[in-house]
Image (spheres, helix red, strand yellow):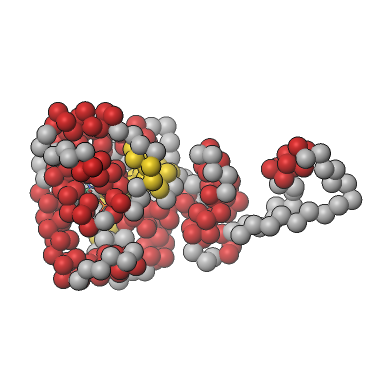
Amino acid sequence: MIITIDGPAGAGKSTAARRLADLLGFELLDTGAIYRAVTLAARQKNVAPEDDASLKHLLDQTRIELRPGEVLLDGEDVSSEIRTPEVTAAIQGFADSRLVRKIVTEKTRQLARGRSVVTEGRDQGSDVFPDADCKFYITASDEVRAARRHAELLAKGIRIGISEVLSSQRQRDLQDASREVGKLVCPAGAIVIDASRLSEDEVLTKLIEYLPRGIRPLDPRDHVKSLANDYLSQGDPLGWFDALYASAHRDTSKIPRADRRPNEHLMDWLDRQRIVGDGKSALVVGC
Ligand code: C5P
């Protein structure tokens, strides 16, 4: 099952895609993060976007992984590095490269194979998954998008003027819309959402409203199980707490508490410690 969300930078599609994926129990493919990781890797090795031979060699040797809330480059978490203004400014050359687009498109299709995903980018509903089950195009006015990006950068401690953000955004829009392959377009059959006057919650509500029959948000308990399984399979048994609380956005109905059965990990631990629980009570503290 594939849901695509495309749109220009700063329209709020990343947040919407993440929240929708969480609610449906789908995986999130942030393809912008892949283009960013490619750019970072190339900059680290001084490979120019026009140098196809070196780029191919580099990308053959480089492992890019998307994890919930993390982007790994050869195993190293580069989630912050890929979002610096320097990387953002350098992306276009790599995003314009036919070779890079081919490799990233193949990787994205491979990541989605046999899975239920929400995939986010510029060309997901048009070029990468033209037969997706559901396509959205989220947009917003230039000024609203620039103001949001500006606030995000400030929150990360990156000091930059709003007019600079607006002009670099216009530059990016132009480049995204005019590249030869994989350009930003509203895909055929996509549902268009203008988020200029909508809050994040309202965008999410609209997405859910327009989902085809048969795709429904998970029951909160199944949502927790799916998150926990994702993190357990990555060897991070506690990571899902943060993801759960973040995705609930303070809505406590999304955080099911006790399910009135002993936690299987507690039972395992008690067994291993040879602690007999008969007649005793246990308090498991979490946060
Ligand atoms: O979405 P984000 O702003 O992180 O994407 C970074 C850049 O990667 C975009 O400006 C765009 O040029 C490029 N991109 C792309 N195709 C995609 C996703 C992102 O060309 N599917």
Q: Which residue lies at the image location 38% right of the left edge and 42% below the top edge?
A: 76
Residue 87, how many percent across, how many down?
Answer: 22, 51
Viewer-closest of 47 and 261? 47
Q: Which residue lies at the image location 18% right of the left edge and 33% below the top edge?
A: 55
Find the residue positioned furthest to the front.
45
Residue 150, how many percent across, how many down?
Answer: 26, 68
Question: In this view of the protein, can residue 94 be seen by the observer?
Answer: yes
Quadrant in the picture for residue 94: top left
- The answer to whether residue 112 is left or right of residue 181 is right
In the rendered image, which quarter contains the C terminus?
A: bottom right
Question: In this view of the protein, can residue 1 be seen by the observer?
Answer: no
Quadrant in the picture for residue 64: top left
Viewer-closest of 44 and 286? 44
- The answer to whether residue 133 is left or right of residue 97 is right
Viewer-closest of 202 and 148? 148
In the rendered image, which quarter contains the N terminus?
A: top left
* Number of callouts: 0
Quadrant in the picture for residue 173: bottom left
Residue 139, how many percent across, how many down?
Answer: 25, 60
Q: Which residue lies at the image location 34% right of the left edge and 47% below the top edge?
A: 78
